[in-house]
Image (spheres, rainbow, N blue to C red):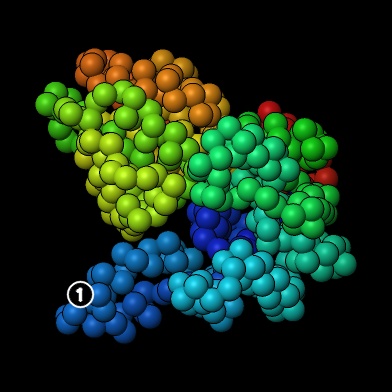
Amino acid sequence: MGNESARVLVCNAGTLHVFALAKALHREGLLHACATSLFVSRRQLGLLPAFGPRAFRRDAIARRVANRMCPELEGRVRAYPLPELLHLGCSRLGLGSRDAWIRWRNRRFQAWVARRILDGVDVVWSFDTCSRWLFSAAKSRGLKCVLDVSIAHPAAGDEILSEHAARCPQYSSDLHGLGKSAAEIAERQLEMELADIVVSASSFTAGTLDRFQVPREKVRVVPYGVNLDGFHPAADAGVTREKTTFLFVGWFSQRKGIYYLLEAWARSGLGARHELLLAGGSRGQLRCWPGELPAGVRCLGRVPHGELASVYRGADVFVFPSLFEGFGLVLLEAMASGLPVLTTPHTAGPDLVADGTEGFLSAPGDVSELAAQMRMLADDPVRCRAMGSAARRRAEYYTWERYGANCAKVVGDLVNLRSGPSGR
């Protein structure tokens, strides 16, 4: 079986980069189908009113469901929405555990894919937490399996997050991802064992897999891409501004380092003249921060992905002090937007950033160093702009086209039963 004849099923119950992957393989002539939970077509969107209350207008809903749409894949996507709709509805009403609902959704989704979509498939490319039962069914048919790990090994995550919970217990209740059960970790490990190839997006993730006995020859590092046309520097990027705007984008969770960021901002003393924007949640979601937020901090709430590009263009520096990631696609989006990035080695930072050129790295939780880095960029706007320009040049290497070619190489290595370079 040659690479050109391989038929790949891409599937995941959530969003992540499933459509980007499916589009990339489709352009390489490898996509058989894409299976997901919710998918909104242009025809469905067209049934909505163009006028009336803003919340129900077509344009407003289109922004909210942008990550559930992909015009290029219409006709190639199979959707199983009921478990996802129940999970979303019950989670928002506070009925049951969100994690329990996700596990239930994922099991239902896998069973549906195994029953309905495996015919005519050569390779199943699926994502972590949503593959164990699907891979078992695929293996019984003699199919090849690729596991796409969106975050580093869960056992490594437990170690890292437990360390930070002990260091700062006042933030531990907002450490999402801490305390995975032995059964959950065992299931994730079994996914990796069933997979013929495990794809990780960063060297940090690959390193954690290595630590927990995932064979090196099984692992491929395939970095994500970024839409360079959608994410680009502001027209006035070279103009000196009176204040420096720092930006964070992500969940308001201590796993993303948000409380360390607030501490660093308070310690930096920048709040009187500069600002820190937090996109991804509301003030009420910062439950572990008592009293007023430090001066200069503003919460933007949840920003639809379709509106993020303009948020990046309104900032000068991107800050993402995450404790534990798989990649952190927001880093590439920010760099493509011409922003220097301040991040940690527990992200794709070491792969993307030469320390002091496109940004700076600091150890997770090193509040003093992060504060010093923010002061340095606020005090030296010329250097800040130069680093932003370097970040854009670096981001231009990471296209979705390059990502697609790398994914096609993974498929080719797999179906031709030859071992390609590990990329490590």
Q: What's under tag 1, amino acid-wise?
A: Arg
Instruction: Tell me residue 267's x, y (percent).
Output: 34, 25
**Residue found 48% across the figure and 66% down from its top:** 73
Instruction: Tell me residue 338's x, y (percent).
Output: 30, 31
Vertical placement of residue 222 versus 136, above or below = above
Instruction: Tell me residue 41's x, y (percent).
Output: 41, 74
Residue denoted by label 1: 54
Q: Quadrant of residue 31?
A: bottom right
Q: Nearer the viewer, residue 223 or 276?
A: 276
Element at label 1 = helix
Vertical placement of residue 91 versus 177, above or below = below
Is residue 274 rendered to the left or right of residue 179?
left
Instruction: Tell me residue 37's x, y (percent).
Output: 56, 72
**Residue found 36% across the figure and 18% down from its top:** 372
Q: Nearer the viewer, residue 360 or 118?
A: 360
**Residue found 42% across the figure and 61% down from its top:** 67
**Residue found 39% across the figure and 54% down from its top:** 285
Q: Quadrant of residue 273?
A: top left
Q: Is residue 408 visible?
A: no
Assign the N terminus to one quadrant of the image: bottom right
Is residue 387 rendered to the left or right of residue 96?
left
